[in-house]
Amino acid sequence: MTGTRFTFNRRGVMGLFGGLATSMACACGKARAQPITGEERSTKSTVLGMGADMLQSKGPIDTINMYLNGFHFYADDMGRQIEAHHYCSHVNEDFFQCVIYDDNKGGARLIGIEYIVSERIFNTLPAEEKRLWHSHRHETTSGELVMPGIPGPVEHTAIAMLVNTYGKTWHTWQVDRDSKLPIGIPQLMMGFTTDGQLSQNMIQDRDRRLGTDTADTRRSREDLARSSPPVAAGADGWTKGRSPQLVLTETPLQNRRG
């Protein structure tokens, strides 16, 4: 990352307040219109799950200590906008990895992943790879990206770490088209880069449900907007009018066994 570098570990500030934010946010999720396809869990399944919970380590999941709420759009269609609940691990000073859900309550749909790198790492990527990544400058300074439940000064410090970072996001569940099952193939997502792109209705709905205030948050981050450098060249490739996106094709099977 450029500028000031912050170090937070699981036993430090981010671990303490990240866990606090997650527990507080879980009480206020968005209601979903349709349940996931499938039968209710049986007593046997429930008991087995309880046993596994007591006996098995959660390994990588235990390192998740940061809850971020923001918005994405499909790289080839800005009209398809999705609220994204990110649960992230701060792997090192230059890299985060996040799992993304459509809600912040138990039973939420796992809809995607996001990798986040510092500007230093982003600048080392090949030009074609950079097209897959979006900047976080507008998301962070506009107040679109928030950490529900975190005290203001702590949130400000954490968000400051993300202003000059870049994300590569894949959504594996197109919940805006089918909320019952993850139909289709993963889709590349992007982040917003200026005012007027993100639906105001989505912002207002998020603020109402999570108790956030995007306008007030934006004002509190004016110092970050003033001090942040321009977005690095190569990010937000969609701004040129075309964007990469996955399509399903058939290819010959290689190295078949058996």
Image (cartoon, rainbow, N blue to C red):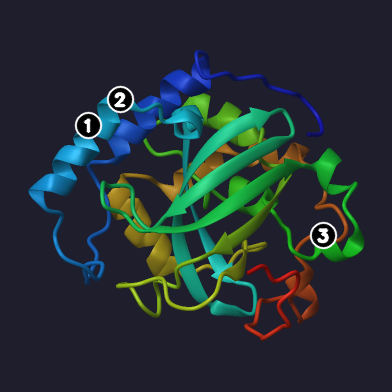
Q: As rendered, which of 166 and 203 lies closer to the eye?
A: 166
* 110 with respect to 126 (left or right): left
Q: In the image, is residue 35 above or below residue 5?
A: below
- Residue at screen point 15% across, 39% down: 47
Residue 80 % position (x, y): 50, 77
Measure the C-alpha gap from mark 3 to mark 2: 42 Å
Quadrant housing residue 101: bottom left
Residue at 82% over, 50% down: 230
Q: Position of residue 23 (x, y in %)?
A: 30, 32
Residue ID for mark 2 = 55
Could you say whether the residue bearing mark 1 is in a helix, strand or loop?
A: helix
The residue that appears at 71% across and 77% down in the rendered structure is 253
Q: CA distance from mark 1 to mark 3?
A: 44 Å
Q: Is residue 85 left or right of residue 90?
A: left
Q: Which mark is residue 120?
A: none
Name the amino acid, label 2. Answer: Leu
Residue 183, horizontal then vertical, whole percent = 43, 77
Q: Residues within 10 Å of mark 2 (few under 14, many from 20)?
A: few
Mark 1 surroundings within 10 Å by alpha-carbon count, few (fewer than 14), some (14 through 19), many (20 or more): few
**On residue 130, which mark appears?**
3
Tag 1 residue: 51
